[in-house]
Amino acid sequence: MDKDITVWNSAFTSILSAYGSHSKQVPMPYANDIFLINCQVAGTYYVDLSDIEPTLEEGQNLVLKREPDNKFDELAILVTTEKGEKLGYIPRVKNEIMARLMDAGKLIYAKLKYKEWQYERLYIDIDVYMKDF
């Protein structure tokens, strides 16, 4: 099941619009962003990020997508921008629990915390969250 933050935002916006101009008064009981981990995006060395990097901003939402058919890791989680631009992957040593949560239908997303070029590699540090309803 492929769920990402943009699908959730679209559905949530549609629900709120049904309430008309008073939508800001609609409570969101028990909705929390639960911090899961901080990590560096793996595989950035293998992706040409020179055109994408200037558009990346700290605090920006990033989309996480499961790749269960990935030939290198059946628990792979792809990290992309909201436009679908590939940045890399959640490191293999940290992806098992998040992959299981995503497979169970939980909404997992990331926020860009920090980025820095070191030689020819862009280091991207992210915080990963689960949207709990």
Image (tube, rainbow, N blue to C red):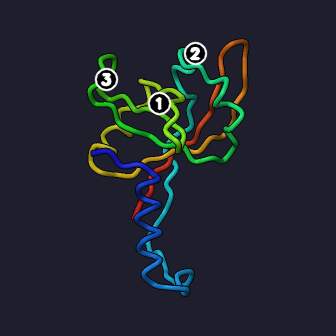
Instruction: Locate the C terminus by quadrant.
Output: bottom left
- Position of residue 43 relative to residue 8, above or below, is above
Kindly identify the residue that appears in the image at 67 percent across and 38 percent down.
56
Q: Disc 2 residue type?
A: Tyr
- For the residue carrying disc 2, how many other residues have a C-alpha within 10 Å: few (<14), some (14-19), or many (20+)? some
Residue 26 has which mark?
none
The mark that comes first in sequence, 2 or 3, is: 2
For the residue pair 31 and 77, the one nearer the viewer reads as 77
Q: CA distance from mark 1 to mark 3?
A: 13 Å
Q: CA distance from mark 2 to mark 1?
A: 14 Å
Kindly identify the residue that appears in the image at 43 percent across and 71 percent down.
14
Residue 45 has which mark?
2
- Position of residue 96 relative to residue 108, above or below, is above
For the residue pair 29 and 10, the one nearer the viewer reads as 10
For the residue pair 123 and 12, the one nearer the viewer reads as 12
Q: Secondary structure at mark 3?
A: loop
Q: Disc 1 residue type?
A: Ile
- For the residue carrying disc 1, how many other residues have a C-alpha within 10 Å: few (<14), some (14-19), or many (20+)? many
* 83 lies left or right of 94: right
The number of discs equals 3
Q: Disc 3 residue type?
A: Asn
Instruction: Locate the N terminus by quadrant.
Output: top left
Looking at the rendering, which quadrant does residue 10 occupy? bottom left
Identify residue for label 3: 70
Estimate the x, y position of residue 48 in percent, counting from the top left: 59, 19
Kindly identify the residue that appears in the image at 62 percent across and 24 percent down.
49
* 118 lies left or right of 84: right
Q: Secondary structure at mark 2?
A: helix
Estimate the x, y position of residue 120 in percent, counting from the top left: 68, 13
* Camera-nearest label, 1 or 3: 3
Identify residue for label 1: 90
